[in-house]
Image (spheres, helix red, strand yellow):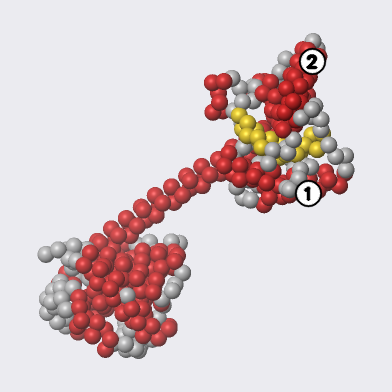
Amino acid sequence: MSNADLMPLINEDIESSIAQMEVRLSGDSPPPSVEQSLWRRSPNQVEENPRIMIIDDEPINVKVARKYLEREGYLEFVTTTEPEKAFDLILEKLPDVILLDIMMPQVSGLQMLEQIRRDDRTNDLPVIILTASTDKQTKLDALNLGATDFLNKPVDPTELAPRVRNALCVKAHQDHLANYAWEMELEVSTRTAALKAAQDELIHSLARAAEYRDDETGQHIKRVGRYAEVIARELGLAENFVRLIADAAPLHDIGKIGIPDSILLKPGKLEPDEWEQMRKHCGFGKRIVESPVSQEEMATFRTHTDQGARLLTGSSSPVLRVAARIALTHHERWDGSGYPIGLAGNDIPLEGRIVAVADVFDALSSKRPYKPAYPLDKCFEIMEEQRAKHFDPKVLDAFVARREDIVKIQCALADCE
């Protein structure tokens, strides 16, 4: 008799065995517990029903396990008798629990279990091993590979449903924890982004408060920040440091808050005493960002560089700490002839050297009370003349290498008459 002739008889045997089991259990079995009832699904709860995958090279074994579980109220199944195709099916269907035969041709259950646990997409799936083997080493190997549970063949329906239910309970708990962790991470990311946006807005407002003293559009601070970002990235600095410089650079002239209008807006050349006051904006800027300001200190904020730096010093914010160094050192020169300290070469913080290039270029290419805007080529020519004098040669090279990007920023953030 062929296999095709045997299948109707086998099906009858399965139905008969299940019916007899139900009769045997119905007389003295207690009603299902609340936990068990939760897993009994009605047809209109398909979306809540766990998906069970059965992998066995023997069709009769698949059919038996499925029939038993259907009688327990489970509705969603993925089955295969081709173990070599099973893993792709797992990835496609994403089951909640897998019943896996251990003795299969081509790909054994142990090999498949190893593959499941090796892949990040499936390594937490509950896998219940089905085996007719009594070999302890086989079970030990399966446990070492991450088997969730074992069931002996032939499958006992009184064991099958509870084992599946327990595995699904563990999976549901794992999913809940994973979802909770993901939701918390999302909430933290959202709040971090909101805080970053608020910080950026406050920094820009603070920088604009100083810049509006002599720049009605406030575009100067935006351009300097963008130029500094381009230079830092061309220098190959770490991305987080690039972002710090980009965020902090707009505060480079915050010390101008302490400079009288008669000096800051003077259209002609400054007198020596006026220039001395203007030079102090670096220190002013550092102090503004660095620490809280007393009323006594505010009375002295009538100079530009020293006070700007002092106001920035001492902050716990990485952006403001970088901004303090920029405010203090962006007028230092590579050859040591700058102010307010007279630092030279690599003693000048890198962020100060970067903003020096960005700030001078914007001053040359923009209209000021004391000068017109210079043509682009003339700006680059003047800056090249200051190589190794005013500017760090490497920083200047990075700036020149990104000329096309600099021009795009200049056009996008041009001052409006």
Residue type at mark 2 is Gln
Q: Could you say which disc has been placed on residue 144 in the image?
A: 1
Give x and y (percent) for residue 319: 40, 64
Mark 2 or mark 1: name the one nearer the start of the chain. Answer: 2
How far is the residue under mark 2 from the one under mark 1? 38 Å
Answer left or right for 406 relative to 67. Answer: left
- Residue occupying the far front of the picture: 1
SS at mark 2 in the image = helix
* Type of amino acid at the residue the image marks with label 1: Asn
Which residue is identified by label 2? 20
Q: Please provide percent x and percent y for residue 230.
A: 34, 71
Front one among 231 and 108: 108
Q: Quadrant of the C terminus?
A: bottom left
Q: Using the image as rendered, state which of residue 192 and residue 258 is in the foreground.
A: 192
Query: Residue extending furthest right?
Result: 135
Quadrant where the image shows the N terminus: top right
- x and y, in percent, of residue 118 in the image: 67, 52
Specify few, some or many for label 2: CA neighbours under 10 Å numbering under 14, 14-19, or 20 or more: few
Taking the spot 34% from the left edge, 57% from the top edge, the residue there is: 200
- Answer yes or no: do the residues labelled 2 and 1 have beta carbons within 8 Å? no
Residue 146 placed where, x, y %? 74, 46
Point 43% across, 61% down: residue: 317
Relative to 127, 295 lies left or right? left
